[in-house]
Image (cartoon, rainbow, N blue to C red):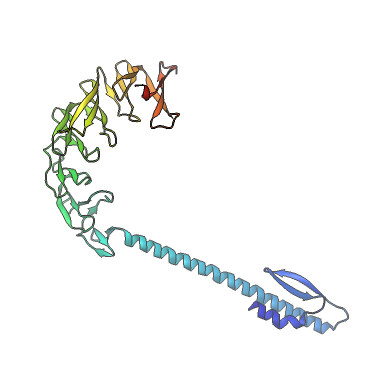
């Protein structure tokens, strides 16, 4: 459009010219010649002003239209994106309650709450009776009716549940009981093979056949997921144990017993645990050997890679001797044990 206007006005702008930069467009304006007719000059100036105004108006209109187009496009994209996100959500809520949907179709009953157990084997739900149950993640069908006061997520095709908040046991994915009752229990660990449960005489470790492998412990740390070595405390004796998965029947063997221990940590770097006695803190290896005598007020550490790039870490233990900040440094290489 702008080019056509200039083509129409071109005959009025001839001979010597002055160049004006208008909105990134070069406009040719004829210089004033005193010898030329003054009426003709005024006509040219009027035409120049009119054409300049038209140029600015067209440029402004184009910019405004472009900006509005961008806004509309942005709003449309945002609405489509939000709609897509909402449609992709498996768990949906409306005025009636929560339900599962698939490809825009409701596939489950309504529940007051559906837990977001996306990475588990099933969704936990709370029914209208206020109790926990489980529904199938893919079909929305009810696997186990709501009947539990407490329920851990369904993992490894099993879950720890309680109907009264006092007695805990494990069920399979269909709701069948797998174990007896325990005073307390943690979900399955060690890739779903073992669990820590509390009996009347202390904490224990059971397998999926409900066979006790370790018992009468004051406490047991989280069972190992990759290695087979763990730690526990029993009657002021620190235990370093190994889960013998390859034996038949499987069992837990005691690697080391550290007497007169008040506390023992889980294994760090799969190599050592911090212990506490009446005299202070110390360190033992995964093999049960004493690395740092338990006589220090505090033990910190730093880990350094092996020079040859092999798996593992060398350790430097910083052992606080007194309250004034005096430390002793003890270096340890697990390959030497």
Please name the residue shown 24% across and 37% down the image: 190
Residue 16 in percent (x, y) is at 82, 75
- Residue 189, picture quadrant: top left
- Tell me where residue 59 sits by quadrant: bottom right
* Quarter the C terminus occupies: top left
Nearer-the-camera pick, 59 or 175: 175
Query: In the image, what residue occupies the spot 83% across and 76% down?
Result: 32
Q: 262 or 95, which is in the foreground?
A: 262
Toward the viewer: 85 or 272?
Answer: 272
Task: Say if 308 sits above or below 43 in the image.
Answer: above
* Rendered location of residue 271, percent (x, y): 33, 27
Instruction: Tell me residue 138's x, y (percent).
Output: 23, 57
User: As drawn, is 194 to the left or to the right of 68?
Assistant: left
- Where is residue 95 shown, x and y percent of the image? 25, 61
Quarter assignment of residue 162: top left
Q: Is residue 195 above or below residue 67?
A: above
Left or right of 291 in this view: 72 = right
Quadrant location of the N terminus in the rendered image: bottom right
Residue at horizontal 77%, vertical 75%?
29
Residue 307 vs 6, above or below: the answer is above
Looking at this view, is 217 or 114 the one in front?
Answer: 217
Residue farthest to the right, as pictured: 35
Disc tally is 0
For image coordinates 70% across by 81% down, the residue present is 7
Q: Is residue 71 left or right of residue 242?
A: right
């Amino acid at each position: 459009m702008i080019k056509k206007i200039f083509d129409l006005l071109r005959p009025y702008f001839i001979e010597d010219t002055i160049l004006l930069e208008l909105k990134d467009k070069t406009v040719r304006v004829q210089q004033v010649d005193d010898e030329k007719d003054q009426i003709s000059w005024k006509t040219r100036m009027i035409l120049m002003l009119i054409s300049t105004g038209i140029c600015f108006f067209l440029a402004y209109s184009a910019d405004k239209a472009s900006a509005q187009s961008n806004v509309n496009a942005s709003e449309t994209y945002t609405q489509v994106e939000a709609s897509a996100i909402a449609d992709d959500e498996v768990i949906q809520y409306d005025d009636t309650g929560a339900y599962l949907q698939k490809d825009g179709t409701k596939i489950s009953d309504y529940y007051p709450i559906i837990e977001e157990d996306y990475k588990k084997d099933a969704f936990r739900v709370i029914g209208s009776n206020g109790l926990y149950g489980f529904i199938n993640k893919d079909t929305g069908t009810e696997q186990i009716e709501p009947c539990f006061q407490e329920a851990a997520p369904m993992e490894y095709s099993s879950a720890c549940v309680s109907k009264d908040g006092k007695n805990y046991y494990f069920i399979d994915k269909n709701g069948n009981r797998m174990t007896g009752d325990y005073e307390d229990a943690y979900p399955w660990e060690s890739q779903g093979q073992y669990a820590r449960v509390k009996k009347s005489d202390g904490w224990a470790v059971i397998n999926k056949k409900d066979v006790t492998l370790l018992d009468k412990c004051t406490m047991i740390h989280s069972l190992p997921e990759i290695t087979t070595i763990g730690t526990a405390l029993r009657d002021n004796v620190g235990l370093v144990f190994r889960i013998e998965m390859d034996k038949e029947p499987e069992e837990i063997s005691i690697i080391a017993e550290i007497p007169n221990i008040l506390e023992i940590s889980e294994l760090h770097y799969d190599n050592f645990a911090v212990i506490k006695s009446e005299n202070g803190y110390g360190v033992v290896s995964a093999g049960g050997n004493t690395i740092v005598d338990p006589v220090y007020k505090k033990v910190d550490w730093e880990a350094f890679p092996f020079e040859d790039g092999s798996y593992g870490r060398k350790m430097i233990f910083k052992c606080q001797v007194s309250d004034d900040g005096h430390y002793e440094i003890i270096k340890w290489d697990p390959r030497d044990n």
